[in-house]
Image (cartoon, rainbow, N blue to C red):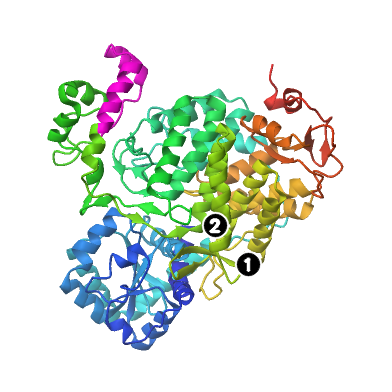
Amino acid sequence: MLSNNYIISSIIFSLLIISCKNEITINSMESNQLKNETSLYLKQHAENPVNWQRWSNSIFDFSGELNKLVIVSIGYSSCHWCHVMEDETFADETIAELMNDNFINIKVDREENPDVDQAYMTASQLMTGMGGWPLNVITLPDGSPIYAGTYHTKEQWFDILNRIIRLKENNYDGLKEIANNVKNGVIDINTITKKNEVSEFDKDFLARNTKIWSDKWDKDNGGDIAQQKFISPSKYQYLINYGSIYKDQKTLDYVKSTLDVISNSGIIDIIEGGFYRYTVDPEWKIPHFEKMLYDQAQMISLYSNAYKLFKKPEYKDLVYQTINFLNSEMNSPNGLYYAAMDADTDGEEGKYYSFNLNEIESISGEQIDLFNSFFNINLDNPWDNNKFLLLPTRDLESWLTANSINKDDFLKIKEGWFSEIMKIKSKRTKPRIDDKSIVSWNALSIIGLIDAYDAFKDDLLLNKAKNMFSTLLKKGYKNKMLVHTFKDRQYQDGVLEDYAYLSKAAIRLFQTTGDEYYFNKSKEIIDNSIKYFKDEESDLLLYTTNKELFTKVVSIDDGVIPSPNSIIAEQLFNIGHIIFDDYYLDQSNKMLSSVKEIIDGNINSYSVWANNILNRVELFYEIAVIGSDSDSKTKLISERLLPNVILVQSNIESDIPLFVDRYFDDETYIYVCQNKTCQRPETNIKYALDQIPYLKTN
């Protein structure tokens, strides 16, 4: 899959420029053109001696005319190693001269142009078996990749460039053969053909695949067994639903253990809030310090839903800590959230978050031994050059017992420590904020806020979600189509994830408020996604509307963010159940059938698809709360975890098929329905939910 995306990225390259309408000329290529960009990442390279251009179709016209190879360098503003390579390599005059004389050089902000990034990252995976950022690709004049790599030292990059230059002079046909092979590989990966028949799924498919996945679970530290740990929230949401429906205590214990470990680990900023992107070790200790909006949004959802099941106050605290971080550090003047917070300050990774021995002594005073014990600090083993990270104890109750401390007394002590820590941090340079607005990531944030509202019934969360949605509708469209990012005067064209996540945000608002405006908007967005992104060769949707790419991009893996195709399939399924329309259900079934063979044996990488399957192999229910008191009853019902259920409400008569002829002036009824047929309406919530076997209470 990645390999497909790689090649597309070279053609998508041309897409990006058109959307920005920058004028590209041969003269403009003789100097660095990034000074007037709004992207923080591009501006970070504006002073390089390299003649950087931003992505544009026009560049490939000139590269062919000038017979120059192209360097496509992709990164993002909060990426530590992107900063290192910029400072060490791209700021070097000798490197710049070599690049300027022999190549056309393009800088890409992967957060502005995720289609370009996906295409070239796929090629990198295909060519090298690995990927990462910065991603540096060398292509033929038409954008077809011939080399891909990540971070390079100045010496490494100098050597690679000279080798490529010699190959161009002495064996250009060999380079063309490489490019052709990569292109064919990418095309093959992105070709998912239609199935003649809709696939059948059964519970054995899920049980077998979940068992295969369970063999990869890290029973000691949580998460999957890996040298680096990413949080991947959609994985655990599926397992929560699976474990709840099948009463699988082993699975639920694993999820709870993982969430408990994460909540007291190095991947969280325990002082100011927010999740880091990942840890570089398998024990969740040492983070890579950038904070991404999509992680915050999804973790708010995950811990809110986990709270419904496990009722741990610590989960609620973590949700609010994360929301408070977003509102205090990443809130934009228009009410949306910014994209990311940098890993570096003053040119050093993690400097803002680490403390030296003198600072530790100042913070803790006479309690230094207690401080070091709680934060797992070994003074003989610093994290880096006499710097230490604050990693709280995993088991607070056991630690309190071992240290003979009352919990309330300790909380007062910890509050004093945190106050001293903030005094020190207040004098430091704060990490940079990437202040672009990304439609899809803000839509994920709306979903997170609604999930938190369901769990905790805080009207401030619902109001924030509604205001954000309104802002996205006002600012997230250009020429009646969604954009992906916007800042000041510059916009980047929308991709499938923008439509998928915004549609889900709309339907979650409909479920929570009963306002049919949100349902109609969700359906409109889904209908447009099918219209704009239809793939004639498969039943899935393309990632981009760009028709000028040399190959299409079809994104199906549920990684750090869900596959837009899996979310579209989910929303088609939900809409079909609300309006009793087989067209939407059939489209959803076809999408799921398309990926059955791909996900079989690898369900850990396709967890949203797995949840789609769960909705089919076990009974799926609509719960419709209809009547003047629908809001209060819906609030009580939504405090529970409801796998394989879509909960909707209406306090008025409605033409929506699920609501038709079910409204009565004098009573509010709860209808539990399945396959267009409803059971006996109830006014009592317990009696209604008892009609669903896996929700039945004693």
- Magenta stretch holds residue 392: yes
| SS state under label 2 | helix
Residue at screen point 54% across, 66% down: 544
Amino acid type shown at disc 1? Tyr
Dot 2 or dot 1, earlier in sequence:
2
| 20 on left or right of 434 | right
> Tag 1's secondary structure?
helix
Query: Which is more toward the observer, 454 or 645?
Result: 454
Residue type at mark 2 is Thr
* Residue 125 in the image: above or below residue 358: below
Q: Position of residue 271 (x, y in %)?
A: 32, 36
Q: Nearer the viewer, mark 2 or mark 1?
A: 2
Residue under the image location 28 percent in, 53 percent down:
80
The number of callouts visible is 2
Task: Name the residue beneath numbered marker 1.
Answer: 532
Q: Residue at x 84, y 33 (%)?
A: 666
Tell me the tag on residue 471. 2
